[in-house]
Image (spheres, rainbow, N blue to C red):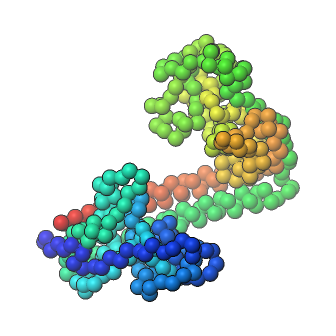
Amino acid sequence: MKWPVKKLGDLTAVLSGFAFDSQFFNNKVGFKLIRIRDVMRGFSKTFYDGQFETRYVVKEGDFLISMDGEFNIAKWGKEPALLNQRVCKITIVNKRLDANYLFHFLPKQLKLIEDATPFVTVKHLSVKKINDIKIPLPLLAEQKRIAELLDAVDKIILGHKKFISILKILINSYFEKLFSDTNNKKKYKVNDFCFVTDYVANGSFASLKKNVKYLDEGFAVLVRLTDYTKNWESSFKYVSKDSFNFLKKSSLNPGDLIMSNVGECGKTFQVPDLKKPMTLGPNSILIRPNPKIAIPEFLVQYFNEFEGKKKLETIIRTTAQKKFNKTDFRNLEIDLPDMPEQQKFLNLLKIINKIKINKINSLIKSKDLINSLNNQFFFRV
């Protein structure tokens, strides 16, 4: 059955936010003010201590749309607040339209408009564009049935997300307990249990430029941190045998750790076996731990997620960008649990990650389901 189609302008009223005078904005006194960044989070930290018309007061559950940048719709939180410019409120004025049905319908439509909107500095959504949106309009009872079904899937998705968050809290809690127990830890300098070097181990950047050339194919893989964020082999760079010999002190073994010491300082990865000679790329350092003192996989977690991040902050220097040098890193003091405790943590992490992967797969399937339902119900225009 094909449903009738109506324009939103025939069923709703859109109120654009008012350009409140910023001289009355503050952090303590007056009425809360909704700025565009507040739409999705449902609360504001900005106050307005000036006069206003009551029609611009937004109440709990009102539908708001952000009109610059990303065009999102969200329900406002509990605290009344003022509707500022670049945000609009959409209100149903025709009883033939169910509110929850509209709320599920609009996100995809706003995304389609956003994708089709040209921009120079930032995309802007007009009230006319909203009013011109065409919405399929089955009988009210059918609208409510569709909204209830989509609400149920939304709850499943939210449940998956909460479960994944709880798993992260569990790992964090275990790690904090591990480091709060003073009986199983020993203080080390990094240099006491790790070999550490960097890309300039064999000389200055001038000599590197002279002796090292990046190639699309070559004798050895140049392992760079950027490769970890891309499709691995498609982004590889290589060096010749002569270049590899020049970089011999920073050649890599499978299982070694590499850490960014420029920009995103402390981001740590473990090197896989690429079946070819490997050497360290720029803006990173090589870490090869003593296997009798530290398990490499434990150090990856330590520096990426937990105590190690705090320790690294003490040696990071900020000039044009964040960075630290290998000497400071070698002298960094850290408390390290004994090997059995490290292994217990990794065993727990393995179990939790397996559960997490299953939950993530369930989350993906739930999102696929709601996308399929949206396409089924809302694209009958």
* Near-viewer residue (312 or 24): 24
- For residue 375, above or below residue 336: below
Give residue 145's position: percent from left, percent from top: 28, 79
Left or right: residue 174 compared with residue 102: right
* Quarter of the picture holding the N terminus: bottom left
Q: Quadrant of residue 178?
A: bottom right
Residue at 33%, 80% (x, y): give it. Answer: 91
Q: Quadrant of residue 117?
A: bottom left
The residue sitting at the top extreme is: 242
Q: Would residue 326 be seen by someone viewing this image from the given angle? A: yes
Give residue 340's position: percent from left, percent from top: 76, 48
Residue at 66%, 52% (x, y): give it. Answer: 305
Left or right: residue 87 compared with residue 290: left
Q: Quadrant of residue 6?
A: bottom left
Residue at 54%, 81% (x, y): give it. Answer: 50
- For residue 115, above or below residue 42: above
Q: Would residue 374 be seen by someone viewing this image from the given angle? A: no
